[in-house]
Amino acid sequence: MKFWLLIISGLISAQNVLADFNDPMRPPAYALEKFRLAKIKNTVTAPSTKVTPLKKESWVLTSILFSSQRQHAIINNKLVKKGDSIKGAKLISLKPDSVQLLSKGKIINLKIYESRANFKSIKKSLHENKI
């Protein structure tokens, strides 16, 4: 019984000693308060009155399948053929290296070679790293 009383009193006194212990790396109270106020100031924002401009339509030509039987293109990860529409633009022409879209009376040319040049350089550098 005395043993348990001794253990309990030791734990209580250790808790009191640890409560008075100050961490030498802890910033002073005024610095913590200054940080807390700055954080609150940065998180509270006034309602924005800025007008965001409309997004410009963009099309990404990934690949073209051009043969005597089929002529398809993959634009914005969607398979389209001549006459199909994508994002409000109609595919009017397919060639082995490019496509033409008609959007709001304007013709948009998308070429495949620009993106393939990047793929060739990436493929070449990957091949050189393996050797």
Image: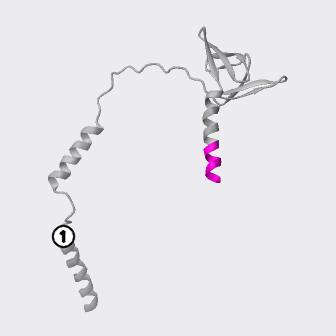
- Image coordinates for residue 83, horizontal then vertical, percent: 73, 16
Q: Residue at x 16, y 55 (%)?
A: 29
Q: Residue at x 18, y 47 (%)?
A: 34
Q: Quadrant of the N terminus?
A: bottom left
Is residue 92 depicted above or below 42 in this figure?
above
Is residue 10 depicted above or below 97 in this figure?
below
Count all numbered tags in the image, as a single digit: 1
- Image coordinates for residue 97, horizontal then vertical, percent: 70, 24
- Image coordinates for residue 31, horizontal then vertical, percent: 17, 51
Q: Nearer the viewer, residue 40 or 74?
A: 74
Amino acid on which disc 1 is placed: Phe
Q: Residue at x 61, y 51 (%)?
A: 129
In magenta, the rendered stretch is 124-131
Q: Nearer the viewer, residue 36 or 107?
A: 107
Q: Nearer the viewer, residue 11 or 28?
A: 28
Q: Residue at x 61, y 39 (%)?
A: 121
Residue furthest to the bottom in view is 2
Horizontal side of residue 100 vs 21, given as left or right: right
- In magenta stretch: residue 11: no
Q: Quadrant of the C terminus?
A: bottom right
Provide the residue designation for mark 1.
21
Task: Residue 39: tell me if it is visible.
Answer: yes
> Neighbour class for label 1 at 10 Å: few (<14), some, many (≥20)?
few
- In magenta stretch: residue 130: yes
Residue furthest to the top in view is 105
Horizontal side of residue 29 vs 62, given as left or right: left
Q: Main secondary structure of the magenta part?
A: helix
Dot 1: element? loop
